[in-house]
Image (cartoon, grey):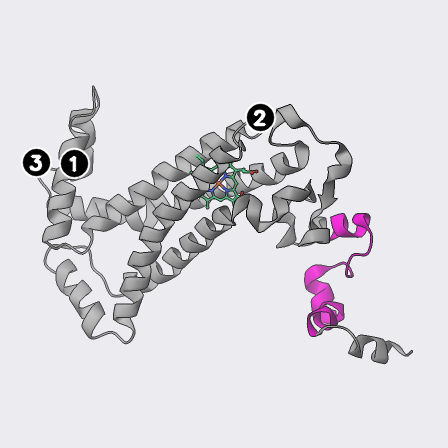
């Protein structure tokens, strides 16, 4: 059979991989041996995030319920919708409320955009909490993954802070009083209460400075921090998943580790 005929028989995706453009992206041909599969991971930007080998049970949906990846996807949805919202929103007491109303009524798909951002934010808090519960239930916080658990706790705090800072931006009654109550609660933290309340509000009560502070934290500082910490989280996950089983008491023989390609 000629090469052209052989290529015709391949799945369109495989045919794309074998083309000059496909080769320039994936670098190595479709893997046939475990060594090829590992080479594919080292050579590809997109694949290298995954561990080369994992325990078989960790690959399937039933192990992780894909909650970690779902958290990441939701974060990306929030960045995409948030950047578009930023084009139409000015964080000042004079314009903030009206800008949000205008986004909903004048901007094509504006209502959808705002709702997508809001729902993705609520969902992310839920999914991150569910991911944490899954990790706990599976005992995946045990050595050697204990450091990644701590990194995860930082991610949870950042996710909650993003929610909290975003809440003020619509500058309506709900936002105003929620942040007034939130800041008052921060004021009761032992030793650091006064200073954290002042830092949050930038004055004696919620005002223009507070709105600006929350905006900068919400659109720049916290998302950048979260992106950085997620990168560390995923890198650690990649290393730890390859290194050893999550549960030390039921160590599995090395044959239980399979190249990721086999099951996915
Ligand atoms: C923005 C929030 C988060 C993102 C985007 C995220 C992302 C991920 C991803 C993609 C994985 C690998 C796949 C999976 O196991 O589902 C993972 C694993 C892990 N995450 Fe998270 N995560 C987040 C928050 C957390 C939190 C709050 C905790 C716990 C406090 C945590 C602890 C862990 C641990 C220990 C693993 C390894 C689990 C295993 O190997 O079975 N993560 N995370």
Tell me what residue is drawn at x 17 percent, y 38 percent.
182
Q: Give the label, 1 or 2, closer to the camera.
A: 2
- Rounded to the nearest angstrom, the CA distance separating label 1 from label 2 is 37 Å
Judge whether residue 227 can be spotted in this image: yes
Q: Which percent across, then down, holds residue 91? A: 19, 55
Q: Which residue is mark 2?
A: 143
Of 137 and 233, nearer the camera is 137
Q: Which residue is mark 1?
A: 183
- Rounded to the nearest angstrom, the CA distance separating label 3 from label 1 is 10 Å
- Local crowd at mark 2 within 10 Å, few (<14), some, or many (≥20)? some
Above or below, comparing residue 45 to residue 180 in the picture = below
Q: Which residue is mark 3?
A: 204
Residue 64 figure quarter: top right
Tell me what residue is drawn at x 16 percent, y 59 percent.
96
Instruction: Give the position of the C terminus as an image quadrant.
Output: bottom right
Label 3, ligand 1: CB separation under 8 Å:
no
Q: The magenta stretch spans which residues?
A: 12-40
Q: Give the label, 3 or 1, closer to the camera.
A: 1
Residue 239 figure quarter: top right
Q: Is residue 164 magenta?
A: no
């Amino acid at each position: 059979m000629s090469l052209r005929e052989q290529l015709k028989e391949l799945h369109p995706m495989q045919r794309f991989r074998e083309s000059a453009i496909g080769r320039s992206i994936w670098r190595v041909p479709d893997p046939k041996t475990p060594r090829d599969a590992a080479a594919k991971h080292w050579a590809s930007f997109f694949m290298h995030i995954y561990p080369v080998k994992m325990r078989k049970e960790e690959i399937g949906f039933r192990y992780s319920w894909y909650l970690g990846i779902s958290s990441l996807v939701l974060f990306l949805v929030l960045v995409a919708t948030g950047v578009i919202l930023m084009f139409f929103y000015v964080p000042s007491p004079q314009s903030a409320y009206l800008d949000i109303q205008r986004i909903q009524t004048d901007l094509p798909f504006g209502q959808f955009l705002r709702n997508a951002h809001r729902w993705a934010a609520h969902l992310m808090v839920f999914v991150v909490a569910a991911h944490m519960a899954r990790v706990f239930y599976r005992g995946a916080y045990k050595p050697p993954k204990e450091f990644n658990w701590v990194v995860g706790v930082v991610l949870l705090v950042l996710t909650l802070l993003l929610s909290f800072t975003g809440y003020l931006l619509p500058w309506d009654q709900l936002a105003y009083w929620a942040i007034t109550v939130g800041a008052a609660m921060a004021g009761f933290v032992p030793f650091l209460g006064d200073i954290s309340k002042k830092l949050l509000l930038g004055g004696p009560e919620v005002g223009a400075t507070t709105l600006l502070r929350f905006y900068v934290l919400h659109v720049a500082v916290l998302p950048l921090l979260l992106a950085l910490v997620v990168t560390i989280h995923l890198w650690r996950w990649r290393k730890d998943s390859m290194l050893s089983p999550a549960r030390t008491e039921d160590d599995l023989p090395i044959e239980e580790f399979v190249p990721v390609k086999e099951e996915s």
